[in-house]
Amino acid sequence: MSCAEQILAILDTHHAFEKAELKRLGQAIAEMDASPRLTAPFAHLRNFLEAHMMKEEQILFPSIQALEGGQFLDISCMIGGMRHEHDELSTYEVALRSAARDAGPLEDDILAFLDDLVEHARKEEEELFPAALALYEARASGSAPQPAAAAPAPTTSTTYRVARRTQGRCEECVRPVPAELRVYDDRVDLAKLCPEHGETVQLMSRSPEYWAELDEYYFRVNSENYPQRDYIVRMTESCNLDCPICLAKANTEETPDLDLSGLEKLLSERRGIKVDLMAAEPTLRADLEDWIRKVKASGNIAALHTNGLKLANREYAKKIAAAGVDEVFLQFDGFDEEANKALRGQPLLKARMKAIDNLRELGVSTSLIVVIARGLNEEQVGETFRFALRPENTHIKEVFYLGLRMLGSLRDSAKAEGNPLADSTLMPDEIIEMLTEQEAPIRRDDVRAFNKLYFAMLSALKVKKCLYVQHYLVIRDDKGGYRPVSELMDMASMEAAAERYANRVDHDHPFLAKAGLLKELSKQGLRPAMWPLLKDFVQLERLMENGMNLAEVPQRMLLLGFITACDPHNFDADVAVNCGKGELSVDGGFIESGAVANVNREARFDETDKRPGARGRKRD
C-alpha cells in the first residue's frame, strides 16, 4: 500500500471516527455534569488530539504525499515531532482510561474511543512512518525513481538556512502546500511549493536575527493548544463603504445576515471571553444594541469593530454606549486623505474625527486600527501614535498597526486587472521597523525583549495568541509625551526571566515555571521608577488573564500592536493552530482559528465570478 493510500485510510477511519467521538463524548460528558476527575483528563486529551490531527492533516500528510509525488522534502523532523506527540498522547490516554470508571454508561464508549486512538498511533508508527522514511532516504540517496511528471524540486542554497518547515497555502489556488521559513543574511522568507503553480515567496521580515529569535522562542512556550477565548462574529457581509482593500469582499454576494443562534449558544456556555462584533459593518444590523446587551449580560466582553461612519452620528453613538459596549475598534488609517481614498475609496477623515470625538465624550474605550501600506502611508505610523498620545485622547487605549494584506477585494482586483496596492503588503516586523525609525525612544531590541515577556506571560496564563500579533507599551504623560516601558523596567533582566521561564516549561512543572516568572516580575516592582505605576501593572497582568478589556486598561498606558491578517501569502499552519481568535460566520460556521477561516473564505471567493460591490452598497 502506498503512503497516499495509507494516509487516506487513516483519514477515512481513525481521524473521522475520533473527530466525531470527541464532539459527541464532549457533549455527553457536559450534559452529565461529571466531576473534574473525568472532565479534566478528557479536556486535556481533546485539546491535544485536535491540535495533533490538524498538524497531521495540514502539514505532515501533504508533505509525505508531495515526497511520494516527486518533490524532495525532509520529513524526518516532522515525523520525529509526531512521534514525540504520540508519547504525550499515550500519557493522556492512560489518564483518561483510568478516569473512565467515573463515566457511568459512557465508560464503554470512552474505552472504545481510546482503543481506536491506540490503533491509530500504531498504524502510523509501524506502517506509515517507516514507509515514508524509507521513501525519504531513497530520495536522499538518489536511488528512488522520479515520476515523469514530477514538479522540479526547490534548489538548496547555501545563502539561507531553514528555520522551520510547516504548511502554507498556494497563493494562486489556495490549496495546502509544503512550506519552509528561510533565514537569509538580510531577510526571512516563507517559501511555498505548489505542484501546479510552482514556488512562491512571502517576505516575513527584513530583520532576520530579530525574527528568528522570536519565532524560536514563541514555539518553545506555545507547545500546548489552549482553549479559545476570543471569537469574531461576522454579523453581516453588507457595508456602507466599498473599500478597495476590504478583507471581507463586502457587498459582493447575496449573503444573508448571520443567524445569531450560534452566538446565543456560545454566550450560554462561556464566561470571560471576548466577542468581536464585526464584518463587514456591524452597525448596519438593526439588532446590534440588543446583542451588545446580551454579550454583557452573559458576563463577556463586547467589542465593536467598525468603520465609524454611523458613530459620527452623536445620537447613534449614544445608543451604542448606552447598550454597554466595552470597547470600539475604529478603522483609522491616518490623516492623509489621498491615502484614505486609495485604501477606502473616499475621504473619511472628517467622519472618523467626529466618531473619535463622540467616543471621547461618551467615555468609550477605543482602539485605532491603522492599515499601513508600503509606499502609501508609512509616515502615518508615527502620526497616529502621536495623535493617540494627545492629552485629550486618553480614551484611546490602543493603536493596532495592521499591515495591508492580500485578502478579499484587494486580492480579487489584483488577480483580475492588477492593482498597484498588491505590491504594498506588509508584515508586522516591517511596521515595527517603521515605528522605531520614526520614534527614536522606542528601540527594536526593547520591543523584542518585551514580546518575549509577553509570550511568556500568555503561556503562563494559558492564553492562546498568534505569533503575528506583537506588542509594546508606553506610559503617557500629561503633555502628550511618553516614556517607553524600557525606561521603567530592566528589559535585559525581563528577557532573561522570559528565557528562564521557557527552560522551566521545557523541563519542570508549568506551575513552577509560572511561579518563577511572577517572582521575577515582582522584583521589577521594587524598582523606584515602578512604584507610581505598580497598581497599573498589576491591573494589566489581571487583564491578560481575564480578557484584555480596554475599558479597564489604566489611562496612563497606551498599548501598541503590530499585526497582520492571515492570507494565502503568509499562512503558516504552525501559527494558525494558535490563532488568538475563533470565528462564527454564515459561510464557515464555527471555526476555532480565524487564520484558517480567512484562507478558507479566499478559496470560496475563487469559486465565484462575482466582483466586489456587485450587489450594491447598503447605506442605512
Image (tube, rainbow, N blue to C red):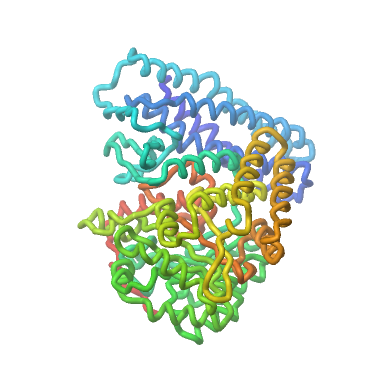
> Which quadrant would residue 370 be assigned to in this image?
bottom left
Asked if one can make out residue 531 in the rendered structure from this viewpoint, the answer is yes
Seen at 32% across and 76% down, the residue is: 347
Q: Which image quadrant is residue 297 in?
A: bottom right
Q: In percent of the image, x 54 and y 29: which residue is there?
A: 81
Question: Which of the 4 quarters of the picture holds residue 426?
Answer: bottom left
| Residue 72 location (% of width, % of height) | 35, 25
* x, y percent for residue 104: 78, 41
Please give the name of the residue rendered at 37% of the width and 48% of the height, measured from the top-left corner: 568
How many callouts does the rendering have? 0
Q: Depth check: give the residue in front, 105 or 163.
A: 163
For image coordinates 60% across by 55% down, the residue present is 229
The image shows residue 27 at horizontal and vertical percentages of 66, 49
Query: Between residues 108 and 2, which one lies in front from this camera angle?
Result: 2
Is 519 placed above or below 305 here?
Answer: above
Residue 21 appears in the picture as rendered: no
